[in-house]
Amino acid sequence: MGCDMSFLSKARLSKDGDETAAGGEVFEKRILLLGLDNAGKTSLLFHMRDSSFKDTVPTVGLNIEHIQYKRYSLTFWDVGGQITKLWRHYFDKIDGVIFVIDSTDKVRLQKAKLELEKLMIDQSIGQVPFLIMYNKKDIADKTMSQEDLNQSLAVEEMQQHRPICIQDCSALTGSGIWDGMDKMINVYEQLKSQATNNAEILNTSKQQAKSLPSEPSKR
Ligand SMILES: Nc1nc2c(ncn2[C@@H]2O[C@H](COP(=O)(O)OP(=O)(O)OP(=O)(O)O)[C@@H](O)[C@H]2O)c(=O)[nH]1
Ligand SMILES: [Mg+2]
């Protein structure tokens, strides 16, 4: 499943467009990493940072990492999954959410769904894109298929509320991690080109308005 782009007209635009020393534009995004404890959020973050798998301990509080990827300066906020009530403290001014699911954990899938649903309808998060990462895909004999996971989580229904991308991945092997980020970045690129188009349309209509005679011509 790719990304449903129908939300584009509703999504908010973030503060883009700082210049780098080299003259290219850099786009800053603040992304929250959420999901139940043991889902693999910190492992994914460390793999993005170091390109290798690192041992983790359960996160108490949060980890923050800045990662440069393509034209994007990404700040990830990895919040511990044990006390989900604390997540709301980090909802302000975010540009996206990565929700990590342990694809081998059938028992807690419904709990993960409940937490995800709460986020989907939370007004304070805004219309930012969500990327759902089905992690631990390397555990071949235990992982649920993407189709089954989408169905159990009712992803299609959730897509009515906000933009959602889906990605299988493994923080152990690294597979799928950057494919997921590319999907998220693709959404940002679409939002950007939509904003440019809107600005051009506004500009053209302003110019057309200026070129109209201010008073009707008298014969
Ligand atoms: N096989 C496998 N194990 C993984 C993967 N990702 C994480 N793990 C393991 O799952 C456990 C939990 O990983 P963490 O990254 O600490 O999970 P977390 O979501 O940050 O958990 P909290 O900090 O408690 O919220 C650790 O033992 C990891 O080594 C994966 O893709 N494959
Ligand atoms: Mg953690």
Image (spheres, grey):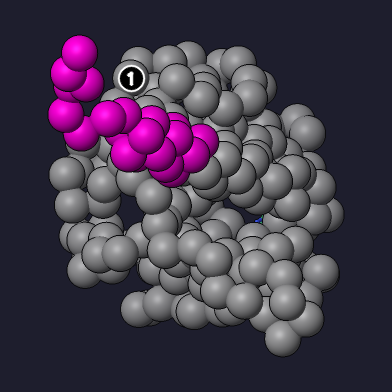
Point out the image quarter for the N terminus.
top right
Q: Is residue 51 above or below residue 208?
A: below
Q: Is residue 191 above or below residue 6?
A: below
Q: Is residue 120 left or right of residue 66?
A: left
Query: Which residue is located at x 31 percent, y 29 percent?
Result: 212
Point out the image quarter for the C terminus.
top left
Write down the residue under mark 1: 160
List x then y, in percent, for residue 162. Answer: 35, 31
Q: Residues within 10 Å of mark 1 (few under 14, many from 20)?
A: few
List x then y, in percent, for residue 68. Answer: 69, 72
> Label 1 amino acid?
Gln
Q: Is residue 66 left or right of residue 155?
A: right
Q: Quadrant of residue 27?
A: bottom right
Query: Which residue is located at x 36 percent, y 61 percent?
Result: 94
Q: Quadrant of residue 153?
A: top left
Q: State which region is magenta.
A: 197-219
Relative depth, front residue between 115 and 14 = 14
Give the prevailing secondary structure in the magenta stretch. Answer: helix
- The furthest residue to the front: 219
